[in-house]
Amino acid sequence: MQLTLKSQRWEMVAPFVTAGETVNHIDVVHVMLEHEGFVGRAETMGVDYFGETVESLQAELSALDPAAISRLDRETVQTLLPPGGSRNGLDCALWDLEAKQNAGGICALTGIALAPLNTLFTLSLDDPDAMARRAYDVPQLTRLKLKLNADAPLDCLQAVREARPDAQLVIDANGSWTPQLVTAVGDGLARFDVALLEQPLPPDQDSALENLRYPVPLCADESCQSSADLEAVADRYDAINIKLDKCGGLTDALAIRVWCQRNKKLIMVGNMLGSSLAMAPALVVAQGADFVDLDGPLWQHTDVEPPLTINAGLIQPPEPALWG
């Protein structure tokens, strides 16, 4: 087994603005595992709010014992690295390698049949009129996620709802709200038919959500990194946002999926931005999910080859040449 790493920069088609940052480009690591003529690939960018960078991921992966790489399997990966971008890259590349060595591909390995899925499309944080115009300009996209901060979120929500009465709306506050604001806007969110409120509070403040009977479902993102965090947030959230970079790959993501199904939690499968190579393994976890948020390639000027086919928000399963 041979490990190869390559850095890649993807330029955004427009600034991707959240409550915490503005992103004009992303830097990622492409991870390749070669064995007996087969090559498994993956893309990872890590978790930026934990300080992970292309440099730190490459350093962490390059420091692995070659002997450990030579006898790598999915179980070993889980103990070799902690949750995060490095494990994600290694784990997803290994899944891809095994899928290419198996006549049935990723479906045979996981027992999960892949079907086309509709993704949310993110509206960057902006003033109400600008967000409404953006929503109006994409009538073919019927699932929209609004990035909102604590500055008059209901004004933005109302503007978008009036522009798009037909759309499913999800709000992502990226932990920028206060417990007081969460309480104050609850009825308004319900009035404008918000399907999900994602990470309203910072992780160190979300104890305020404990056993809260809120008008719309609440989803954990930054508060739940991996399967190890599930029990701690079980009484605070109705949904879990599963991201491969957070939890450290497809293996743990599938474990979270099973836990959510058993515990009657809504499932959201999200992304940290990234190309079709980053989204492809997430499509496995997203089968049957309540919310699919895998619009990363739509934000990029260019993509990997072959890319995912995405038309009007509908993502087709990846070709084996891409992943799986």
Image (tube, grey):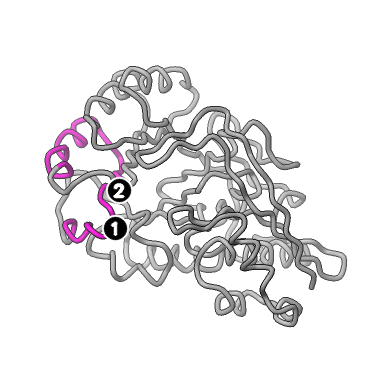
Q: Is residue 16 rendered to the left or right of residue 175?
A: right
Q: Residue at x 67, y 47 (%)?
A: 318
The disc labelled 2 sits on which kind of residue? Gly
Instruction: State yes or no: residue 201 in magenta.
Output: yes
62, 139: nearer the viewer = 62
Task: Bin the neighbour count of mark 1 within 10 Å (Cα to Cα): few under 14, some 14-19, many 20 and up.
Answer: some
- Where residue 258 appears, as percent x and y from the top left, is 44, 66
Q: Which residues are magenta?
A: 181-209
Q: Which residue is tagged 1?
A: 203
The disc labelled 1 sits on which kind of residue? Pro
Q: Which residue is tagged 2?
A: 175
From the image, which quarter does the N terminus lie in?
A: bottom right
Would you say the magenta stretch is mainly helix, strand or loop? helix
- Where residue 324 appears, as percent x and y from the top left, is 69, 57
Q: Earlier in the sequence, mark 2 or mark 1?
A: 2
Q: Quadrant of residue 60?
A: bottom right
Q: Are marks 2 and 1 in contact (CB under 8 Å)?
A: yes
Q: Residue at x 62, y 57 (%)?
A: 55
